[in-house]
Image (cartoon, coloured by chain):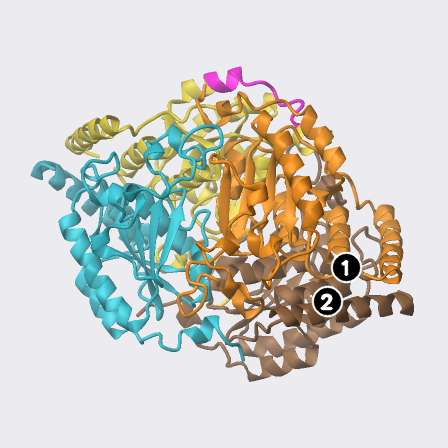
Chain colours: A brown, B yellow, C cyan, D orange
Amino acid sequence: MPEELTDALERIFAADSSIYQGRGFQRRVGFGDRPALVHIDLANAWTRPGNPFTCEGMDVIIPAVQRLNEAARPKGIPIVYTTTAYEVPEGPNSDTGLWHLKIPVEVLKVGTEAVEIDARIAPLPDEQVIVKKRASAFHGTYLSSFLRAHAVDTVIVTGVTMAGCVRHTVEDAIAEGFRPIVVRECVGDRVPGVVEWNLFDIDAKFGDVEPLDRVLEYLDGVEAWHEAGAVGAEGS
Amino acid sequence: MPEELTDALERIFAADSSIYQGRGFQRRVGFGDRPALVHIDLANAWTRPGNPFTCEGMDVIIPAVQRLNEAARPKGIPIVYTTTAYEVPEGPNSDTGLWHLKIPVEVLKVGTEAVEIDARIAPLPDEQVIVKKRASAFHGTYLSSFLRAHAVDTVIVTGVTMAGCVRHTVEDAIAEGFRPIVVRECVGDRVPGVVEWNLFDIDAKFGDVEPLDRVLEYLDGVEAWHEAGAVGAEGS
Amino acid sequence: MPEELTDALERIFAADSSIYQGRGFQRRVGFGDRPALVHIDLANAWTRPGNPFTCEGMDVIIPAVQRLNEAARPKGIPIVYTTTAYEVPEGPNSDTGLWHLKIPVEVLKVGTEAVEIDARIAPLPDEQVIVKKRASAFHGTYLSSFLRAHAVDTVIVTGVTMAGCVRHTVEDAIAEGFRPIVVRECVGDRVPGVVEWNLFDIDAKFGDVEPLDRVLEYLDGVEAWHEAGAVGAEGS
Amino acid sequence: MPEELTDALERIFAADSSIYQGRGFQRRVGFGDRPALVHIDLANAWTRPGNPFTCEGMDVIIPAVQRLNEAARPKGIPIVYTTTAYEVPEGPNSDTGLWHLKIPVEVLKVGTEAVEIDARIAPLPDEQVIVKKRASAFHGTYLSSFLRAHAVDTVIVTGVTMAGCVRHTVEDAIAEGFRPIVVRECVGDRVPGVVEWNLFDIDAKFGDVEPLDRVLEYLDGVEAWHEAGAVGAEGS
């Protein structure tokens, strides 16, 4: 995006922030005690070239997500990946719902390489890969009950696209009662501007946008979940 | 179940029906215009011997479900199958939620033969198989939005178990705004009595319990969905 | 219910329990660390005579619920009441959905005395009264996100009716990731038998049925929530 | 917003549209057969001066919403209003969930004039006013089951704020299987720019943004719902 357009957006954000702060918006939701990582649609259709869904910025996003995973795994912090894929991408019995009327979801077929999680950040065998049908990772999935059963209170969100699935996921996360933290370096999209304005809206109203270093520092301080099974396991 | 126990249940049902009818319960929800078939957990773990989840009565249920499918397919009526299966059946990152604390869901692993739909009623390639994690076919799944996008107003429910997944599905179906019809010959369970009392409760409050012949007759009269694509397809 | 019918049910339950236990059902979900009380439809239409929804057993249920509230309030344990009521009980714009096709919900009008919580167990000003439209306290309400935001992991369920709203609520509770505990003395219905068989099904598959004394003892041992605000309040 | 900033946004949108169209985004979801109007948070806190939630542009929005209502009422098209309000706006038992950590929802108390629908567009007695707790009109409410029970397939969305509740509602609407149509003249917000970029994102991915005249023309052509009761009423 040309610098003059970036500058224009920054000027709008500054004016809006002034209004928001004067009215008590843009508060901090803060980090809770038990986080989970939720990686949105970092599958090949989005992370590799040549697909209608291909996004920009993977040279920054992928390594940053790797660092989050490396920080989370030794602590037993749950890691959830999503992909968007359909059993019946077209026709009268399609599970695309109405979304194919708006965007080219017909290219996202269950079982194809396109919808597999990018091998550079491959899930371990005991990590969840949720196949969703809609934009939000919560909509029509077991994500909220999975997180609740594991006593998660904070969702660290990464992935793509910022203007679509990441934003809807963050909105749902706070609605469901989880603290949403969006990692600045870990989100992307495929057209200019939308990362910036969606992060702006989210930080004003739905979740905190935080730099990678701050999130890594937080994960470093989180207590390991070695007794996390206590929650989903034996009652008193 | 010994005849004397069956008789005892019938006597209770008769007394209860008298109270319900006097108060305006046990009404008929009726059939709508656009049905879908929803087959609950007719996968091998439930339909074949030797599994903790094995149910009785498949010699009646399977042929009856076959007849429903044969009636529905030529008309383009959507058919949805569910199975219950987990990516991580045990341990701190399990997607069983809290349910393993109550029942042996740890034997239901995604990708195993046990959780595949019974081959005698195998889904066609363009029919939906929804992998659910909870009892209800609606809970944490895209079933309601799939049905809504296809303008379905009536769900014909079959499968197992009556005291578990079928009942919860029917309760959710009417809550979501679909007319639930339970096919009497097509539902089963694994312990005596529970089919009878759960059908009784459902017919009193949540959906209509109808014999197979009545449902086949209804399906025979339903208009074919050859233009059903109009709903999920092009707007005006 | 005549003793012989009670005996017949007991014999069925004994036979079924034997099968369930042999297969690994009827496990204990157990009590968690942070309970909430959820009182289902203890409003006048259900607790007082003369309404189609009137239930039996209030001489036992009401005092038992009072004792639960007395145990919970000093500890800051959240108490949620539900009632079922409609803005537009009849006609083409009704919020009864399809339920009026099955049961007489048209008598349940928002703002009438019938749908107010029974004064004997009146909510305090800072306790939640959720007006629900469907059987489950979770369906189409903010209950799950309310509980999650307050870090609740266990729901102590009371109220009516056992065959309707209580059962559906319990099924949803475990599906959402909360431990359901049904208090034996605090649930009721309006026709014979249904309390018994629904408690039986629940205890087999969805939640633990516990006597009042056991639940009071548990509440006595729960840590007070004086810092509970930490969850819904300031992050780190 | 200064003209140079508006121009900058327009230039970004033009560039993005070029990419989106090349990849098959920005399709038309189109109008269906059975619409409902959904007016988001047109209550005094948002439509009148002096509240942290006060929005701009009511001199255009209110008359445009009046015209929609006038077109819809004679046809029996369902009209739903939402407001956002809390029983317990602050403290450990609050129904604000975690949202008060981000925005000043503590000023939105159930029963106050602030959260009543603006009298200039007052609901008729048989129109629904849904009190929601979260941004989306669908989240934790009975909206989707209400619409489904009335066979609605299209939601005409108006109200505020564009960057908050309107956007989240539209995202959920298409996810649930309803065609979302946002009426250009009927949506607003309280800070510059956010109406434009959120409409841009929505039109690219989630719903169609249409001018008032086009929507009025559509409503004019919709068949009256005088037999709409057939759906929620008697089955065959």
Q: Which residues are magenta?
A: B217-228
Within the magenta stretch, is there residue B221? yes
Q: Is residue A107 magenta?
A: no
Which quadrant of the structure image shows residue A173?
Answer: bottom right
Q: Is residue A192 left or right of A103 when viewed as pictured?
A: right
In the foreground, A22 or B199: A22
Q: Quadrant of the C terminus of chain C?
A: bottom right
How packed mark 1 is, by other alpha carbons closer than 10 Å (few <14, some 14-19, many 20 or more), is many
In the rendered view, tell whether residue B45 sits above or below residue B222.
below
Residue appearing at x 64%, y 30% in the figure = D71
Q: Which residue is mark 2?
A: A16
Q: Quadrant of the N terminus of chain C?
A: top left
> Is residue D200 found left or right of D84 in the rendered image?
right
Identify which amino acid the numbered label 1 is placed on: Gly
Q: Is residue D176 above or below residue C97?
A: below
Using the image, name the chain to which the residue with label 2 belongs.
A
Q: Chain of mark 1?
A: D
| Secondary structure category for the residue under label 2 | helix
Q: Which residue is mark 1?
A: D193
Type of amino acid at the residue the image marks with label 2: Asp
At 69% from the left edge and 26% from the top edge, which residue is drawn? Answer: D220
> Distance from label 1 to label 2 (Cα)?
8 Å
CB atoms of marks 1 and 2 within 8 Å: yes
Location of residue B101 in the rendering, given as x and y in whole percent from the top left corner: 36, 60
Position of D165 relative to A181 (above/below): above
Viewer-side residue, C52 vs B204: C52
